[in-house]
Image (cartoon, helix red, strand yellow):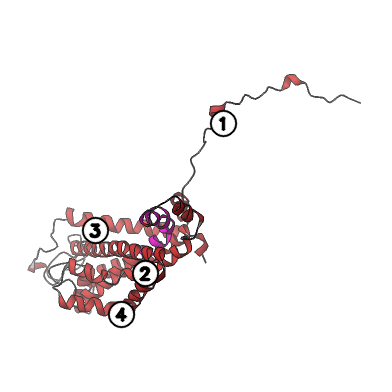
Amino acid sequence: MEDRMLDRALFVRARVDAAEREHIAAPASGVLMDAWCRLRKNRAAVLSLLILILILLFALLAPVFSPYSFKETNYDDIYAPMSPAHFFGTDQFGRDLFVRTWMGCRISLMIATVAALLDLLVGVGYGAVSALLGGRVDAVMQRFIEILVGIPHLIIVILFLMTFPAGVGTIIAALSITGWVNMARLVRAEILKLKNQDYVLASRVLGSSDSYIILHDLIPNAVSVIVINVMFTIPGAIFTEAFLSFIGIGLAEPQASLGVLINNGYQVLRNYPHVMIAPALVIVLIMVCFSILGDGLRDALDPQMRR
């Protein structure tokens, strides 16, 4: 029988370097990186994100580089149609609608973003404290929320705007009066699930304060719920601001917002439809893109919620 033993000379003993053995070939990916990798696979969400970035760039840069001011009137060009001189045409005062549309988009986005941030700060803090303390404190805080929920949000906003003079700050305050309630309830529900986890109990054993546990242990693990809610709060605030301006209790001339522009276009829709086309398309794009991006972020940040 033929000897099939391998020659020892064919093998070389591997050298193990202790320093190289401890070397990490690639850094561990965090939650946000994993979420981004999942989000990139959602083409509709990525396309919506790109469209929103493009809209934001136009809102920031178009009024700056345009030769026209959003307040500049020209009675020789009243209701001028779309042309190379005026991409979106002009309105009843001869003002360039291209500049006014993007200036209105800037103002609407600013109002919605600030209102969403206020909802974030108040809602997250309120919901986290309510859930962590529990007991009678939680019961009292939830009864207060139930009182606010029982009053329609739109009625509170309208009464607030009828009491105080209309302006950007007034609209932001009106949107934020009860806008934080939904955020608070979602954060409370999430933290109720998290506060009995082992890492929270370990943090308590080590002597951590309630504020430390909220900021370092609970809120970071509830970030998916917070981000998703913010993504749906912004388009809701844009729509509410546009509705208020459309019915005449929001911003007024000569200020520009998407609601003001749509209101102006609606009044002359039959004769000059171009006045309403541009702002209406912009607000539709914003609403649809935020909705699609919010769904994509929900699936990326919390795959268990994926349908």
Numbered range of the magenta stretch: 211-230
Considering the image in quadrants, where does the N terminus appear? Answer: top right
Disc tally is: 4
Along the viewing direction, whichever of 252 and 163 lies nearer the viewer: 163
- Tell me the CA gap for discs 4 and 2: 25 Å
Q: Contact, CB < 8 Å: mark 2 with mark 1? A: no
Type of residue at label 4? Pro
Residue lying at 52% horizontally and 62% vertically, measured from the top left: 304
Type of residue at label 3? Ala
Along the viewing direction, whichever of 160 and 128 lies nearer the viewer: 128
**Local crowd at mark 3 within 10 Å, few (<14), some, or many (≥20)?**
many
First in sequence: mark 4 vs mark 2: 2
Query: Disc 1 marks which residue?
Result: 21
Q: Position of residue 270 (x, y in %)?
A: 22, 80
Along the viewing direction, whichever of 268 and 302 lies nearer the viewer: 302
Q: Nearer the viewer, mark 4 or mark 2?
A: 2
